[in-house]
Amino acid sequence: MLKKIILIFILILHFSCKQETLKTTSYEILNEKERALLKDELLEDRFQNLLPELMDKTEIDMWVLISREYNEDPVLKTMLPATWLNARRRTILVFYRNKEENTVERMAVARYDIGNSIKSAWNKEKEPNQWKALRDIIKARNPQKIGVNISKHFALADGLVKTDYDEFTENLPEEFKERVVSAEKLAVSWIETRTPKEMALFKKLVKITHDIIDETFSVQNIIPGKTTTEDLVWFMRQKVTDLGLSTWFHPTIDVQRNKEALKSHIASFSKAKEKEIIRKGDLLHCDFGISYIGLNTDCQQHAYVLKEDEQEVPTFLTEAFKKGNRVQDILTSNMKAGSTGNEILAKSLLQGKKEGLRPSIYTHPLGTYGHSAGTTIGMWDAQGGVPFNGDYPLQKNTAYAIELNTTVAIKEWNKDIRIMLEEAGFFGDNTFEYVNERQTAIKPIKF
C-alpha cells in the first residue's frame, strides 16, 4: 500500500512539473486562418493610415510597382494578401494620391483583385495589352511624379527589374517620361515604418524569441561534457518548426572560456561556427531570430554554465556584462530623429571610448525584413561609418536590432572577452524603448 502511495505521489509530482513546463513554454500562436486574417488586417491598416502620409512626405503622387511571378519586388511582396504567396503572371500595382480629395486609389493592372485591398483595374477582353491599360490609367490621372522602385544603394528599394523598366518606359507617353523618379525614399519608408498594430504583434514575437532562448539555455537542454553548441542550434531550429514558425537565418551558439584566446572578428561573426562541447564554466552566446506574420526578430544573449562550487555568475562576468548594457545605453541615447546612422555611430563610439570602453556598433533596421531598409548604424567591419545607407536620416516609428559588442579584459581568465548583445528596439516620437525589455544579466545555468 505504501509503495502504491509513493508511486502515485511521484506520478502527481511528475505531471505537475510537466504541466508547469508546458505552461511556461506555451505561446499565443495563431493558426493559419487566424494569421491570414491578422496579416490582411495589418496590411489594410497600412494602406489606409500609413501610405497617404508617406506619399505626401516623399511628394510622389503615383507609385507604380511591377513584378512577375517568382521574381517579386521586395516591396510589392509586402503588399500581397495572406492568400497570395507570390505575384501572378505580371502584376502591376498603382497607387494614386489625390491630396486635395484626401484619397489614395489602389489599383491592380492585373487579371485579378489583389485580395480585398487592391481591385483589378484591367479588363483584358476590352484592352488585351497590359501596358496600354497602365498607360490609360496614368493619362487619366495626370500624376506629377511617378515613382518606381529603382535604387543604387538600398536593395529593398531596387525591385524593378530591367526588362519591366524598359517595357514600362517604352509604353509611357512621351510627356510622362520626364516625370518618372526613383521611389527610393517612399519604398524605404514603407518598409521601415511600423504601425501601432504591428508593434503590438512585434512585442509578442520578441517575447517568444526570448522564451525560446531561455529554454535553450537551460538544464533541460544542456548536459555539460556531452551537449554541443550544434545540439542547441538544432534544438532552436526544431523548436521554431514545432511551433509553426520560421526563421530568417540559421541560429548560432558559441562559447568563450578560460584559457582560450579570443577569436577574431571574422570568426566571431561567421555563421559557420565550430562545434564545441559545452563545459561548466563556459560563457555561452546565441544569435537567434524568428519570423511571423510579416515581422522578424533578431536577438543575441548570454548564459553561463555554473561550475560545481559556484552559486551565481562570477562577479567579473557580471561586471563585464554591465559594460555591454552601458554601450547599449550610449547608443540609444544618441538616437535622434534626423540624425544619420553615421552621425549616431561616431558620437556613440567616441562617448564609449571616453568612458574607457572598447565598443563596436553594428545596428540595423529590423521588422519587415531581418536586415531591413532604413539607416544603418555601423557594420562590424565598418566602424568608421557606412557610405550612403549610413547617411540616411533616422526616422520616427521605426524598429532596429540594437546590435553591438564591447571587448572586456578579464584578469581572472588572463584574456579579453566580448559581450555581444542584440535586442529589438523601437524609435517612436524621438523616444527609444526596447520592444520587450532587454537582457540585463547573464543567464545562470545551474546543475
Image: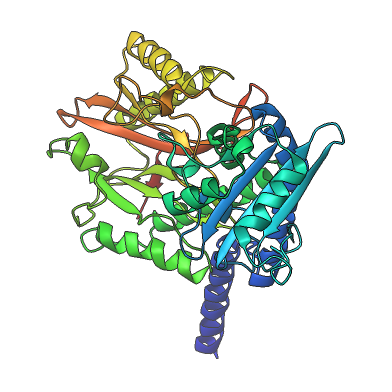
Who's the residue at 71% across and 40% down the image? 51
Direction front: furthest residue: 174
Image-quadrant location for residue 233: bottom left
Q: Can residue 197 be seen from the camera position used here?
A: no
**Image vertical order of residue 323 relative to residue 284, above or below:** above
Nearer-the-camera pick, 342 or 276: 342
Q: Position of residue 73 (x, y in %)?
A: 51, 52
**Image vertical order of residue 13 relative to residue 284, above or below:** below
Q: Quadrant of the C terminus?
A: bottom left
Q: Position of residue 99 (x, y in %)?
A: 81, 32
Image-quadrant location for residue 12: bottom right
Q: Is residue 262 left or right of residue 286?
A: left
**Image vertical order of residue 442 relative to residue 410, above or below:** below
Q: Can residue 181 be seen from the camera position used here?
A: yes
Image-quadrant location for residue 321: top left
Q: Position of residue 83 (x, y in %)?
A: 64, 69
Direction top: furthest residue: 354
Nearer-the-camera pick, 105 or 361: 105
Q: Is residue 136 left or right of residue 157?
A: right
Q: Is residue 351 left or right of residue 427?
A: left
Q: Quadrant of the N terminus?
A: bottom right
Q: Position of residue 206 (x, y in %)?
A: 55, 48
Direction bottom: furthest residue: 1
**Image vertical order of residue 421 relative to residue 121, above or below:** above
Who's the residue at 38% across and 15% down the image? 346
Who's the residue at 30% across and 31% down the image? 380
Nearer-the-camera pick, 289 or 285: 289
